[in-house]
Amino acid sequence: MTKWHAAYIQNAYQELKRGTTRKQLDTLNINATGKRVLDVGCGPGNLLVALSTDAPELLIGVDVDETFLVFGRSQVENSIDPPAAVPILLRASLPILPFADETFDLVTCFLVMPHVPDDRLALAELARVLKPGGTLAISGHGFGFPLRYLKRFRLKPLQMYIASLIYRCTRKKWIRNTLQNDKKICNLLNSIGVVPEMRHYNQKILGCVATYWIKAIKSETNPKAIQ
């Protein structure tokens, strides 16, 4: 385990202990009771622990990082109180998820969008595994996010802005950790038949969104075809 993994895990479970993780769900009015739930980009599983308190019918987390999954499989089980079901953790990543169409009632995908290869393809895949009428909850970084780190990491914010500019011009994420315009994300969701119902910002810096949170509902009718 790298120092970065250790620091990330420590912060994730501190947020869980402080109630921050649960608050993120409550702010979007997310309730997993009796539902089939998928958390994409589950990391070390802190969000899965928070979701388990609602007693979902099925709870699955997927992540591309095996280090997080190994830690999460042990930590999550120890953090969940009976009779809540223990989540299943699998290795997978966007834009290809190993699940059938319309499998889940609720899909969460927090702070993953900055790292996916293509925003539209990623959202389309999340919509594919979601049942009609199901809920998608996502979050990502807006253009104000790097401003928080100007004093600590002078090059990192610049890299994020450059990455975002390259993606906007080429439609390819040559450098991951891009920034998104949440209004454009909402437009993409509408275009694939997933209708934004709620949008929340946890912070704005110099008038720019730092982190956005979106709750959207998959249309009961057939979504529009991906162009």
Image: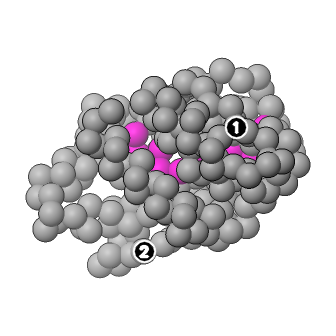
Q: Estimate the x, y position of residue 44 in percent, counting from the top left.
A: 50, 42
Quarter of the image containing the N terminus? top left
Tell me, yes or no, whether the highlighted magenta stretch contains residue 107.
yes
Nearer to me, 222 or 76: 76
Q: Estimate the x, y position of residue 34 in percent, counting from the top left.
A: 88, 49
- Numbered tag placed on residue 72 in the rendering: none
- Numbered tag placed on residue 203 in the rendering: 2
Q: Which residue lies furthest to the bottom in this view?
A: 206
Q: Estimate the x, y position of residue 2 in percent, counting from the top left.
A: 28, 36
Tell me, yes or no, whether the highlighted magenta stretch contains residue 188.
no
Q: What's the amino acid at mark 2?
A: Gln
Q: Magenta span covers which residues?
A: 104-115
Q: Is residue 214 above or below residue 52?
A: below
Q: In this view, does 8 lie to the left or right of 12?
A: left
Q: Going 79% across and 49% down the picture, which residue do you hit?
A: 82
Disc 1 marks which residue?
87
Nearer to me, 154 or 33: 33
Q: Between disc 2 and disc 1, whose residue precedes?
A: 1
Name the element at disc 1.
loop
Q: In this view, does 66 lie above or below 166?
A: above
Q: In this view, does 3 lie to the left or right of 104?
A: left
